[in-house]
Amino acid sequence: LAKTTQPISMDSYEGQEVNITCSHNNIATNDYITWYQQFPSQGPRFIIQGYKTKVTNEVASLFIPADRKSSTLSLPRVSLSDTAVYYCLVYNFNKFYFGSGTKLNVKP
Amino acid sequence: NAGVTQTPKFQVLKTGQSMTLQCAQDMNHNSMYWYRQDPGMGLRLIYYSASEGTTDKGEVPNGYNVSRLNKREFSLRLESAAPSQTSVYFCASSDYRSGTNEKLFFGSGTQLSVL
């Protein structure tokens, strides 16, 4: 199973765009990349998922280069409520393994 | 729509006691999972069940047993609790079909303390 590596923490200010990069050098051909958000005392919540190139939904974008060895979660114009831990997962056939995540702290 | 429901929300045990954490989902999902999350850490997979009648070990299965009672329910049992099992336990489910476009849906967690 591909291991993921993310920065432990990041700081940002309200209104800025935040990019969190995840490294997954050993990703396999059939693996998908997915990101989750977790607030304190809650279970993680799905944000976005992709296989290659770019995926966008109403809350985030996911950029995946051609070699798929990394991915970048982009959060446009963050607010204080985006302060949370963000997890990058590489999964295949319903085996989901979480890494340590990136703690994003949004400041006013 | 309740989603994934876990009981109890809080539990305190003494070393050596046993207990069962209950989880039920009402989304007709095939797959269910148990994770634990220690303070300041990510989630670690304990056991999962790809479908009714099947269970498999995850990263940290030692000290735990599971039962997929039916499609809706997946329970986690601690036979002899140890302080090292103090953690927050999350149950999750997903509608696994082909490995694509899967999303995990989580319960609100059970905070377990073993003294």
Image (cartoon, coloured by chain):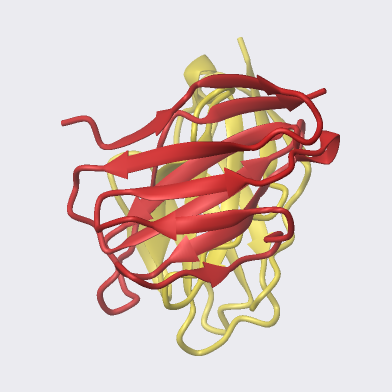
Chain colours: A yellow, B red
Instruction: Tell whether B36 sits left or right of B102.
Output: right
For the C terminus of chain A, give its image quadrant: top right
Q: Is residue B12 visible?
A: yes
Is A79 drawn above or below residue A38 in the view shown? above
Residue at image coords 51%, 56%: B66
Instruction: Tell whether B62 sits left or right of B77.
Output: right
Is A10 in front, or is A3? A3
**Rendering quarter of residue B82:** top right
Q: Position of residue A56 (x, y in %)?
A: 33, 54
**Rendering quarter of residue B18:** top right
Instruction: Tell whether B80 sits left or right of A88.
Output: right
Is A35 drawn above or below residue A45 in the view shown? below
Q: Position of residue A63 (x, y in %)?
A: 48, 63
Q: Position of residue B103 (x, y in %)?
A: 35, 56
Which residue is outermost to the bottom?
Answer: A29
Is B109 drawn above or below residue B52 in the view shown? above
Instruction: Tell whether A44 sits left or right of B81.
Output: left
Residue at image coords 49%, 18%: A81
Residue at image coords 45%, 28%: B108
